[in-house]
Amino acid sequence: MKQPSPRGEISTLVLNTITGTVDAGQDSLARLATLVEEAVAAVPDILYDDDLQLALFCLYELHYSGIDEAGDDWEWNPDLLRVRQQIEKAFERRVRDEVILGDLPGTTSEAVCAELFRMTGADSGPSMSRFVAKSATDDQLHEFAVHKSIFQLKEADPHTFAIPRLSGRAKAALVEIQADEYGNGLPARMHSALFARTMRELGMDDTYGAYLDAAPAITLATNNVMSLFGLNRRLRGAAVGHLAAYEMTSSQPNRLYSRGFKRHGYGEGATEYFDEHVEADAVHEQIAGRDMAGGLVESDPGLLQDVLFGAAAGLAIDTRMTIHIMEAWESGRSSLRPSAAMAS
């Protein structure tokens, strides 16, 4: 991924550190740890803090495709990992503040699945999909694509980290879902490739991270929560719950997104990504709820609360992002940060 523009002292120091050598970075790491400690204590709300969210996103990115000029040795550098954990702890605490779980259901597969459907069905946040279908301007469709691109151009990758952390029925179900996400062996059918095609049809850059500078902190937070769950084994239940909720809230919104693009005259090249998810996720939601999430809890009942937390956290942070976007659009403002990528 191309290096993003820093958004403050911490993200500047993170980027400067990882693009240098490990030996030369020790003094920077000590300074970085101090800055992070001060920042997480003082920041009003880490969900909306551009500097900390970008820093965390970049630290996570070392485990994905990497960042231009960042050395591979940094991925498992223990001092850098400690800095990441400093930010993670504050971020996780804030995410947990968003979640209030009611009475827990039983630990059977059917009970877990029913509760997940109840949670996703009860989501009362604003509907961006209905707005896109009926009202969004062409400029807003482009902004929508920017927000989506931060995850969709690497779709499935955060949840894939959970595969070796599961076993049996839950693992088989997760692999089945992910196989579809990765195109069942056909590169052109990978969902990330389909979304890249959507961006090209919009006349946009389909390179992963091309619009990262334009993405506000809350959009990065929706991505960082997936990496938080996927990269920490202790949160494997949350990763499963997050994916289950994602699949259960995908089919109908994607139908509406497709309608919005067609309303502006875009053809199959732009809508195929959304149309594919209408069909695929109608199947995935059953596998995710019963076999993946339900199967995991049946095999390890102690993970029930984690599974439900992951689902609720995903819904809550996504709702906050949607509120940010909708409030901007309704007031006639852009929902994005000023950036060279959007100015070109």
Image (spheres, rainbow, N blue to C red):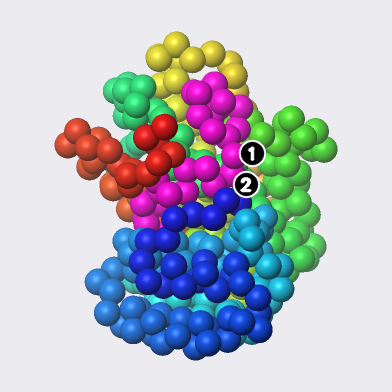
Is residue 255 visible to us here? no
Measuring from the top left, give residue 280's x and y in whole percent.
64, 33
**Amino acid bearing label 2:** Lys
On whether residue 21 falls in the magenta region, the answer is no
When asked about the image quadrant of residue 257, the answer is top left
Q: Which residues are magenta?
A: 196-221
Tell me if residue 146 comes above or below residue 64 in the rendering.
above
Front position in the image: 325 or 33: 33
Measuring from the top left, give residue 242's x and y in whole percent.
53, 57
On whether residue 212 falls in the magenta region, the answer is yes
Judging from the image, what secondary structure is the residue with disc 2 in? Answer: loop
In 3D space, how far apart are the residues under numbered discs 2 and 1 (Cα atoms)?
6 Å
**Amino acid bearing label 1:** Ser
Which residue has dot 1 on it?
Answer: 192
Front position in the image: 256 or 298: 256
CB of mark 2 within 8 Å of CB of mark 1? yes
| Mark number displayed over residue 31 | none
Which residue has dot 2 on it?
Answer: 154
